[in-house]
Image (cartoon, rainbow, N blue to C red):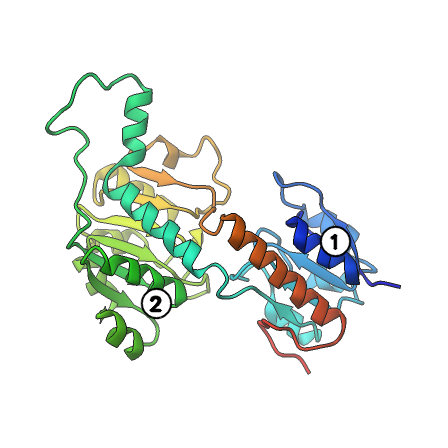
């Protein structure tokens, strides 16, 4: 008899077909709403596997509701929604999908950078609002990207991929990271800076950090005050890295020029949130990896992690190690 698993969102067709070959999936059948925590807790008993998304809180209590749980497979790269220490203590392997969305996310980060620099969303609103009467010499002036300085905070795979794109625009490249990366410095001509110096020197700042206790709220009022008034902040990492109230105040006061975000805190952002009243912000609904090819690839990786865990094999892409 195939093991039973709980899936917190519908998967692409190829991944679903593969899944059904080795297990009996029960699926939260909605793409518009995340599976409620209490729903997951009610459905998990008797399940051997959980395939979840970054919107799902997977804590110790949820794991204890399913004492037969053999594997947790995250259909994403980040896993700050999972209590990995609790999983390890219970002997439950956790897997994620690293590397699969690097180039797609870097594409989107650079798209946000360009949209913020050239005020594309503001321009569209201007046209839709019926304000476009003639060509204006000083209408919606933005900033040049070519030759500007880009500061990357968090130089992992995605940060490095963004830097490669920036080289095509002859940008001066700076980075801040917990550890220096001589290999990227040599390859990309990127220069290390302490965070304060990077913020002060950069025209564009792109965030590519995991959300940890150390990175939560990293960018707040003090950091915004260090930035140039023409600075554009891009965030495709996690919303919690930026203090939302401080961001609002900085944008409203003109301490920075623009913010271009794929992630927010809270997430999803309520339709009446005050950030949405500002003209100098671009917000996307966490879609940096949302290409057909990439989402299909990460779904298949998550299924392969799930299958390995159910069969007692090492996960192809493990987050933790259990004996």
Residue 246 or residue 168, whichever sits in front? 168
Q: Mark 1–mark 2 contact, CB under 8 Å?
A: no
Left/right placement of residue 276 relative to residue 87 reads left
Left/right placement of residue 141 relative to residue 209 reads left
Residue 13 seen by the camera = yes
Element type where label 1 sits in the image: helix
Figure quadrant of residue 177:
bottom left
Residue plotted at (66% across, 79% down) = 322
Q: CA distance from mark 1 to mark 2?
A: 37 Å
Q: Report x, y in % for residue 65.
A: 77, 60
Residue holding disc 2: 155
Residue 159 or residue 63, whichever sits in front? 159
Q: Report x, y in % for residue 238.
A: 44, 54
Residue plotted at (29% across, 58% down) = 165
Residue count near mark 1 (Cα–Cα under 10 Å), binned few <14, some 14–19, many ≥20: some
Residue holding disc 1: 41
Residue plotted at (31% across, 28% down) = 124
Residue plotted at (25% across, 18% down) = 131
Going from N to C along the chain, the mark reached first, 1 or 2, is 1
Residue count near mark 2 (Cα–Cα under 10 Å), binned few <14, some 14–19, many ≥20: many
Q: Report x, y in % for residue 78.
A: 51, 61
Q: Report x, y in % for residue 161.
A: 35, 62
Left/right placement of residue 9 relative to residue 230 reads right
Position of the N terminus, as image quadrant, is: bottom right
């Amino acid at each position: 008899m195939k093991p039973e698993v709980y899936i917190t969102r519908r998967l692409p067709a190829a991944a679903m077909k593969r899944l059904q070959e080795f297990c009996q999936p029960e699926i939260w059948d909605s793409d518009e709403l995340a599976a409620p925590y209490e729903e997951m807790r009610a459905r998990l008993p008797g399940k051997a596997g959980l395939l979840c998304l970054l919107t799902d809180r997977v804590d110790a209590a949820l794991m204890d509701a399913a004492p037969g749980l053999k594997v947790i497979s995250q259909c994403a790269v980040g896993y700050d929604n999972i209590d990995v220490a609790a999983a390890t203590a219970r002997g439950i392997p956790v897997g994620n999908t690293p590397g699969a969305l690097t180039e797609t996310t870097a594409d989107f980060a650079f798209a946000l950078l360009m949209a913020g620099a050239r005020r594309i969303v503001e321009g569209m609103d201007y046209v839709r609002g019926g304000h476009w009467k003639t060509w204006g010499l000083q209408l919606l002036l933005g900033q040049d990207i070519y030759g500007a300085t880009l500061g990357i905070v968090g130089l992992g795979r995605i940060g490095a991929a963004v830097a490669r794109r920036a080289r095509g625009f002859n940008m001066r490249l700076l980075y801040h990271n917990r550890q220096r990366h001589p290999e990227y410095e040599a390859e990309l001509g990127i220069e290390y800076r302490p965070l304060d110096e990077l913020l002060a020197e950069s025209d564009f700042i792109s965030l590519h950090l995991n959300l940890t206790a150390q990175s939560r709220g990293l960018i707040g009022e003090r950091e915004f005050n260090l930035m140039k008034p023409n600075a554009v902040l891009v965030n495709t990492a996690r919303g919690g890295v930026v203090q939302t109230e401080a961001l609002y105040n900085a944008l409203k006061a003109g301490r920075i020029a623009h913010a271009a975000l794929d992630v927010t805190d809270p997430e999803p952002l309520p339709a009446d949130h005050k950030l949405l009243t500002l003209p100098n912000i671009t917000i996307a609904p966490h879609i940096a990896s949302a290409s057909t090819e990439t989402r299909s690839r990460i779904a298949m990786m998550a299924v392969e992690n799930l299958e390995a865990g159910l069969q007692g094999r090492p996960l192809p892409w493990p987050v933790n190690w259990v004996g």
